Amino acid sequence: MRFMVMVKATKDSEAGVMPTPEEFAAMGAFNEQLIKAGVMEAGEGLHPSARGARVAFSGQDRRVIAGPFAATSELVAGFWIWNCASLQEAVEWVRKCPNPMRSDSEIEIRQIFAPEDFGAALTPELRAQEERQRQAIASRAP
């Protein structure tokens, strides 16, 4: 099972406060453990929402909303993509994670849909299209 593991934003992360060298080192060591265990597929930090935008959809209309966004607790400051046997395994890995922020923080874990989760809605033609797209993306990977 694949999971998106999201580090929730804080006032510091939204203010652009960078981690200390010690905090970078601790997270780097944790990431090494994930990689050696075959769990981590990707992981990145995100710039503050002030440097982002949202696009709101209403029928055929699109409205662009420039950041920053108010509800810091609902924002994501960084993420991993992990491959784990279960949600419980992902939880156990998060419990080993150094605190990603200097203050109290939260990490949210959400399972990523797999093709079989969509049932009959993902027709053989759509499944083939999705596989072609995945292969195209993988062929561009460094």
Image: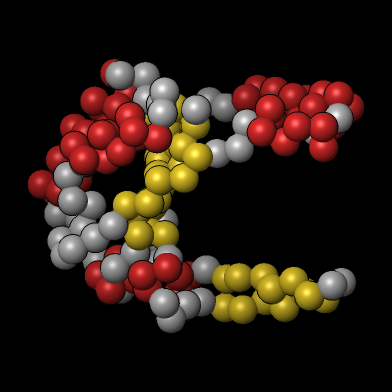
Q: Across the whole image, how many numbered discs are drawn on residues?
A: 0
Q: Is residue 33 above or below residue 92?
A: above
In the image: residue 51, left or right of residue 64 = left
Q: Residue furthest left?
A: 22
In the image: residue 20, left or right of residue 93 = left
In the image: residue 45, left or right of residue 24 = right
User: For this rendering, which residue is in front, 62 or 6?
Assistant: 6
Query: Which quarter of the figure has residue 50?
Result: bottom left
* Residue located at (55% from left, 39% from top): 112
Q: Position of residue 125 (x, y in %)?
A: 89, 27
In the image: residue 17, left or right of residue 124 = left
* Residue located at (25% from left, 27% from top): 32
Q: Is residue 11 above or below residue 114?
A: below
Q: How is the image coloured?
A: secondary structure
* Residue located at (37% from left, 19% from top): 38
Query: Which quarter of the figure has residue 94?
Result: top left
Q: Position of residue 126 (x, y in %)?
A: 84, 31
Q: Position of residue 42 (x, y in %)?
A: 44, 35
Residue 104 visible = yes
Q: Position of residue 83 (x, y in %)?
A: 44, 27
Q: Is residue 23 above or below residue 34?
A: below
